[in-house]
Image (cartoon, rainbow, N blue to C red):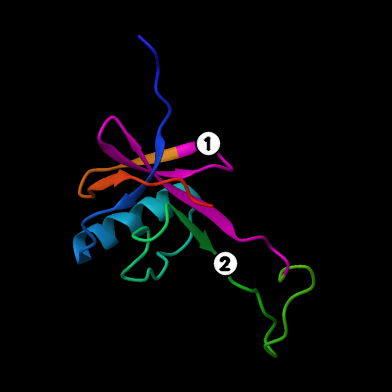
Amino acid sequence: MTQVEPQPARLTNMSPAVKAELQQAIVELIGGEPVKLADNAFVASHQLFIEQAILRDPQGRPIMGRHQQPAILLELQQDDKQCLLSHPASGRSVLLSLSSCQQAAAEQ
Protein backbone atom coordinates (compact mmCIF):
# COMPACT_ATOMS: atom_id res chain seq x y z
CA MET A 1 0.00 0.00 0.00
CA THR A 2 1.36 3.40 -0.99
CA GLN A 3 1.45 6.16 1.61
CA VAL A 4 -0.29 9.23 0.20
CA GLU A 5 1.03 12.63 1.22
CA PRO A 6 -1.49 15.18 2.57
CA GLN A 7 -2.75 17.43 -0.23
CA PRO A 8 -3.41 21.20 -0.16
CA ALA A 9 -7.04 21.86 0.78
CA ARG A 10 -9.56 24.63 1.29
CA LEU A 11 -12.28 24.95 3.90
CA THR A 12 -15.84 24.24 2.85
CA ASN A 13 -17.60 25.09 6.13
CA MET A 14 -16.29 28.26 7.82
CA SER A 15 -18.31 29.00 10.95
CA PRO A 16 -17.60 30.52 14.38
CA ALA A 17 -16.86 27.02 15.74
CA VAL A 18 -14.47 26.23 12.87
CA LYS A 19 -12.76 29.61 13.30
CA ALA A 20 -12.29 28.90 17.04
CA GLU A 21 -10.87 25.46 16.21
CA LEU A 22 -8.43 27.04 13.74
CA GLN A 23 -7.35 29.64 16.31
CA GLN A 24 -6.71 26.91 18.90
CA ALA A 25 -4.75 24.85 16.36
CA ILE A 26 -2.61 27.89 15.49
CA VAL A 27 -1.80 28.45 19.18
CA GLU A 28 -0.89 24.76 19.47
CA LEU A 29 1.40 24.94 16.44
CA ILE A 30 3.17 28.27 16.94
CA GLY A 31 2.33 29.39 20.48
CA GLY A 32 1.38 32.86 21.58
CA GLU A 33 -2.03 34.45 21.80
CA PRO A 34 -4.94 33.46 19.55
CA VAL A 35 -4.77 35.31 16.24
CA LYS A 36 -7.64 37.18 14.61
CA LEU A 37 -8.77 35.32 11.51
CA ALA A 38 -10.79 36.66 8.61
CA ASP A 39 -14.07 34.91 7.86
CA ASN A 40 -12.57 33.66 4.61
CA ALA A 41 -9.30 32.25 6.03
CA PHE A 42 -8.41 29.05 4.13
CA VAL A 43 -11.49 29.45 1.88
CA ALA A 44 -9.74 30.98 -1.16
CA SER A 45 -6.26 29.55 -0.51
CA HIS A 46 -4.72 26.64 1.33
CA GLN A 47 -2.04 28.96 2.76
CA LEU A 48 -2.18 31.56 5.52
CA PHE A 49 0.66 33.93 6.41
CA ILE A 50 0.71 35.32 9.94
CA GLU A 51 2.74 38.46 10.52
CA GLN A 52 4.60 38.46 13.80
CA ALA A 53 3.90 41.32 16.19
CA ILE A 54 6.46 44.10 16.27
CA LEU A 55 7.95 44.44 19.75
CA ARG A 56 8.17 48.09 20.77
CA ASP A 57 9.88 50.06 23.52
CA PRO A 58 7.89 52.27 25.96
CA GLN A 59 8.06 55.16 23.44
CA GLY A 60 6.47 53.01 20.73
CA ARG A 61 9.61 52.57 18.62
CA PRO A 62 10.42 49.10 17.21
CA ILE A 63 13.00 47.30 19.32
CA MET A 64 16.23 46.77 17.36
CA GLY A 65 16.09 43.73 15.08
CA ARG A 66 12.60 42.69 16.15
CA HIS A 67 10.73 44.18 13.18
CA GLN A 68 12.28 42.05 10.46
CA GLN A 69 10.84 38.71 11.51
CA PRO A 70 9.44 36.69 8.61
CA ALA A 71 5.76 35.85 8.43
CA ILE A 72 4.74 32.41 9.66
CA LEU A 73 3.31 30.12 6.98
CA LEU A 74 0.47 27.73 7.81
CA GLU A 75 -1.18 25.38 5.33
CA LEU A 76 -4.51 23.59 5.30
CA GLN A 77 -4.21 20.02 4.06
CA GLN A 78 -6.45 17.05 3.48
CA ASP A 79 -5.26 13.60 4.45
CA ASP A 80 -7.66 10.69 3.89
CA LYS A 81 -10.74 12.97 4.03
CA GLN A 82 -9.53 14.67 7.23
CA CYS A 83 -8.48 18.32 7.49
CA LEU A 84 -5.08 19.12 8.96
CA LEU A 85 -3.52 22.46 9.81
CA SER A 86 0.18 22.23 9.06
CA HIS A 87 3.19 24.34 10.06
CA PRO A 88 5.74 23.41 7.36
CA ALA A 89 8.69 25.05 9.14
CA SER A 90 8.37 22.66 12.09
CA GLY A 91 6.84 19.72 10.24
CA ARG A 92 3.99 19.63 12.78
CA SER A 93 0.28 19.43 12.08
CA VAL A 94 -2.97 19.40 14.03
CA LEU A 95 -6.08 17.42 13.09
CA LEU A 96 -9.16 19.64 12.71
CA SER A 97 -12.22 17.66 13.79
CA LEU A 98 -14.88 20.36 13.15
CA SER A 99 -13.58 21.48 9.77
CA SER A 100 -14.63 20.17 6.38
CA CYS A 101 -12.29 20.68 3.47
CA GLN A 102 -11.75 19.62 -0.10
CA GLN A 103 -8.59 19.23 -2.08
CA ALA A 104 -7.49 22.56 -3.53
CA ALA A 105 -6.83 22.99 -7.23
CA ALA A 106 -3.22 23.66 -8.11
CA GLU A 107 -2.35 27.30 -7.39
CA GLN A 108 -0.22 29.30 -9.75
Give the residue pinned by disc 1.
91
Of 20 and 101, nearer the camera is 101
**In the image, 78: left or right of 48?**
left
Q: Which mark is residue 51?
A: 2
- The answer to if 82 sits in the magenta stretch is yes
Q: Main secondary structure of the magenta part?
A: strand
Name the residue at 36% across, 51% down. 25
* Relative depth, front residue between 86 and 27: 86
Q: Amino acid at mark 2?
A: Glu
Q: Quote the CA–CA distance across marks 1 and 2.
A: 19 Å
Q: How many marks?
A: 2
Q: Secondary structure at mark 1?
A: loop
Other residues around mark 1 within 10 Å, as few (<14) / some (14–19) / many (≥20): few
User: Residue 6: horizontal and vertical position, in percent?
Assistant: 40, 33
Q: Are marks 1 and 2 in contact (CB under 8 Å)?
A: no
Q: Which mark is residue 55?
A: none
Q: Earlier in the sequence, mark 1 or mark 2?
A: 2
Please tell me in which quadrant of the rendered image residue 70 appears. Answer: bottom right
State the image coordinates of residue 86 (x, y, percent, origin top left): 44, 43
Residue span colored magenta = 68-92
Quarter of the image where the N terminus is located: top left
The magenta stretch spans residue 75: yes
Residue 35 higher or lower than 22, as above or below: below
